[in-house]
Image (cartoon, rainbow, N blue to C red):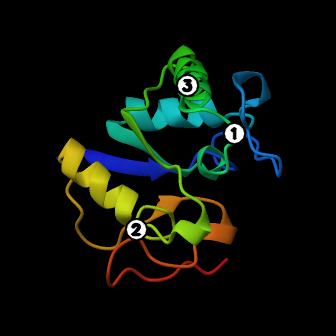
Amino acid sequence: MEYTVFLDRDGVINRDSAGYIKDPSEFEFIPNSPEAIAILTQRGFRVIVITNQSMIGRGLASKESLDAIFEKMKAGVEAAGGRITDIFYCPHVDEDRCSCRKPKPGLILQAQKNTGSILAGPLWWATVPRISSAPAAPGAPRPSW
């Protein structure tokens, strides 16, 4: 059985910014995060990034800029020996009340559908405390930050 790890991007893989990461030049890995992803990859885990990117909905950056940031992130992880299998993101702002903005499970359900990941038992994703107020799957315990 292949296992899947869902990681947030900002604050987990790269340094977060109150002003948003709008351009590849602003993207900076958290020390050792590419190497940590490489360890997961080498141990057989499929790594999927699940991330809110409201800068798109706010008009602060284009989808092309976001794609370039994702390419820089994937290249850095690959250089460390790891692999990001896929990336799913929500471009919406809170006011859109979409089902894909974390902590809602829409992106994880989309990833499950697109990748064939099996969601069984409690499900967690690595994220920053400010958006992890709800479990990713019904019945999953809440984190105690």
Is label 3 in a helix, a strand or a loop?
A: helix
Measure the alpha-carbon separation of dots 3 and 1: 19 Å
Three-letter code for the amino acid on which mark 1 is drawn: Asn
Give left or right: position of 1 versus 56.
left
* Picture residue at 53% right of the left edge, 67% below the top: 96
Question: Residue 95's spot in the image, x, y percent?
Answer: 59, 70
Give the residue number, with chain letter if any, for mark 2: 99
Give the residue number, with chain letter if any, for mark 1: 14
Three-letter code for the amino acid on which mark 2 is drawn: Ser
- If you read the primary sequence from the N terminus, does the residue marked by circle 2 or circle 1 appear first? 1
Three-letter code for the amino acid on which mark 3 is drawn: Glu
Question: Residue 54's spot in the image, x, y percent?
Answer: 62, 52
* Residue 68 location, quadrant: top right
Give the answer, above or below, for where 114 lies relative to 140.
above
Identify the mark at residue 64; answer none if there is no mark.
3
* Picture residue at 62% right of the left edge, 81% below the top: 144
* Picture residue at 66% right of the left edge, 61% below the top: 128
The count of marks equals 3
